[in-house]
Image (spheres, grey):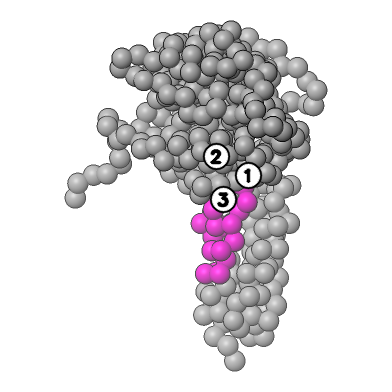
Amino acid sequence: MIDEALVANHVFLNLRNVIDPEIRRPVTELDMIGGVSVDADGVASIDLKLTIVGCPAATSIERDVHDAAVGTDGVTSARVNVSVMSPAEREALTAKLRGGRPKAMQFGPDSLTRIYAITSGKGGVGKSTLTANLAVAIAERGLRVGLVDADVFGFSIPGLLGIAGSKPTQVGEMILPPVAHGVKVISIGMFVDDHTAVSWRGPMLHRTIQQFLTDVFFGDLDVLLLDLPPGTGDIAISLGQLLPQAEVIVVTTPQAAAAEVAERSGLVARQTGQTVIGVIENMAGLAQPDGTILELFGSGGGVDAAARLTTPEQPVPVLGSVPLSLALREGGDSGVPVVLAQPDDPAATVIRSIAETLSTRSRGLAGRKLGLSPR
C-alpha cells in the first residue's frame, strides 16, 4: 500500500521542474496544474491547463509533465488530462506575471534592466548583425536578455537569429516573444507576411514601439538591446521619449564619411536625454595570408566617431573594432550567430569581448525606487 496523498504531493513538487518554454517559469507557479491525484495502484492523474488553444509548446509541456510524474517514487504510470485555461484564469495569470500592476511600460525609469540602443548614421554598416551577436554573447554569460527589433522598415533580426517565420504567442492582452539562442526576441517581422514592405508614418511607428515595450512580456531582464533603424528619424526620437535612460552605442565603418554620419545618430540620442557610451567600428579590415591587413573601407572611422562624440563631461570610447569576417556573414545567413558557430573567429572574439564589457558594467541605483519599505 502507498500513501496516495503523500505521493501526489511528491508529484506536484516534481512538477516544479517543468518549465513553460515561452514564459520561462514552472508550470506550478503559472497555475497550469489544476490538480494531482494518485490511486492505490500508483497511477497518477494530472490536470494540465494550457494557456491558450493551440499552444505551440503543448506537446513538449505535456511530455515533460508526464515524465516528471512517472519519475516520482511510488508512481507506476501517469495520465495527463489536458484542457485550456478559462478567460478568467488567463486574466489572473496575466495579472500575476505583471506582479499585480496594470499594463504599463515594463522598462520605466525605476527599472534595473540595463538598456542598450544600437544605432548607426547610415545603413549597411552591420548594425543588426552586431546587435544579434551581442545579444547571444551576453545571454551566453548567463544573463537574461531581450532584443527588440526596432528597425520596422528593415527588420532582419528574426532571420539573423534563425527564427524567421516564428510567431509570438498571445495570452489575453499579453504577447510572449519567441526565444532564440537564449534571447527573447520581438520584431514587426513576426506580425507581417513574408516579403511584405512596411510603409508607416510616425504615429503608427510610435505606437508599434510602445506596444513592444508594454504588451510584450519579457519578464525580468538583465539586459535589453534595441536594434534601431539607421539615421535620425521617428523611431529614434520615439525611443528617446519612451526610454530616456537607454544607453546608446553607435556603429560605424572605418570610412571617414561613415564616421561623420554616425556622429549625427549619437547627437540625436543626446538631444532626447540618452547617453552615448561607446562606438563600435565594424568591417575594420581583412586579414591576408601573409599577416597583413587589407583595409577595404579605410581606417580610423571608429576613433574619429568616438572623438566627435566625446565631451568634457562624457568621454566616448571605442568599445571594439570588428574585422571583416566571412564567418560573421555566414552566421547571419544561416541564423546561427558567429559567436556560437565559430567562437574563435577573430570577429567573434572581438564581439564577445564587447559583450563582456556590456555585461559587467555597473548599474547605478541613484534616483531609482528599489521597492523596499522599512518595517
Which residue is rendered at x = 58% and y = 7% of the image? Answer: 257
196 in relation to 171, above or below = above
Front-lying residue, 105 or 35: 105
According to the image, label 1 marks what residue? Answer: 343
Nearer the N terminus, badge 1 or badge 3? Answer: 3
Nearer the N terminus, badge 2 or badge 3? Answer: 3
According to the image, label 2 marks what residue? Answer: 352
Q: Is residue 66 left or right of residue 18?
A: right
Nearer the N terminus, badge 2 or badge 1? Answer: 1
- Label 1, secondary structure: give it: loop
According to the image, label 3 marks what residue? Answer: 24
- Label 3, secondary structure: give it: loop
Front-lying residue, 146 or 76: 146
Front-lying residue, 135 or 352: 352
What kind of residue is marked 1? Pro
Which residue is rendered at x = 66% and y = 75% of the image? Answer: 70
The answer for how far apart the CA atoms under marks 2 and 3 are is 25 Å
Residue stretch rendered in magenta on the structure: 12-31
Q: Are marks 2 and 1 in contact (CB under 8 Å)?
A: yes
Crowd band around label 3 with a 10 angstrom C-alpha radius: few (<14), some (14–19), many (20+): few
Picture coordinates of residue 184, whole percent (x, y)? 59, 40
